[in-house]
Amino acid sequence: MSVPSMSELSLLKALWKEHPLSAREIHAQVGDELGWSFSSTRKTLERMLDKSMVSQQLRHGVQVYQAQLDKVATLAAFAHDFGRRVMEMDGPLPVNMFTGSRLVDQQELAQLEQLLHDWPGEPDGEQ
């Protein structure tokens, strides 16, 4: 799985919390965080559509978006990438670093731990 950019992740997080959302609704949630214009949000959503990260449909005359990337799998890819590239770790990141996150619940935390442990090519989870 390719890891979304930080701005793409911000839009995905908004969609994981609530969906479907219009581009305006997404922008209202991420605009301050990203510090960009509505047109930048739209352009990013278009690129994400091209990459199949989100889907788009017409609802009540408004285009709305929904995340197509699984939240836990995407977070696992980010954590794995961070552990390898940033922290130069050979094994999986300890899942307790995610405890207290407002982004994942206990069940998702368990899934995240399993995904990180079983990451393809990892010494403990080689497949």
Image: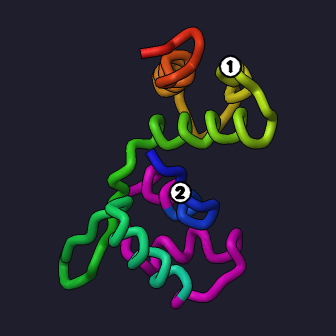
Magenta-tinted stretch:
12-39
Q: Judge depth for marks 2 and 1 and give the one in front.
A: 1
| Residue 67 lies within the magenta run | no
Residue flagged by tag 2: what amino acid is it?
Answer: Pro
Q: Where 26 sits versus 77, above or below?
A: below
Q: Can you say whether 68 is above or below 123 in the image?
A: below
The amino acid sitting under disc 1 is Gly
| Residue 20 appears in view | no
37 part of magenta stretch: yes
Residue under the point 70% across and 69% down: 33
Which quarter of the picture shows residue 6? bottom right
Q: Which residue is mark 1?
A: 91
The quadrant of the image that shows the N terminus is top left
In whole angstroms, how far apart are the C-alphas of marks 2 and 1?
22 Å
* Residue 20 percent coordinates (x, y): 32, 62
The residue that mark 2 highlights is 4
Q: Which quarter of the rendered picture does the C terminus lie within? A: top left
Left or right, 16 with respect to 32, comes to: left
Label count reads 2
Q: Nearer the viewer, residue 117 or 8?
A: 117
Residue found 51% across the figure and 13% down from its top: 125
**Which of these two is toward me, 18 or 10?**
10
**Where does residue 28 sit, x and y in percent of width and height?**
55, 75
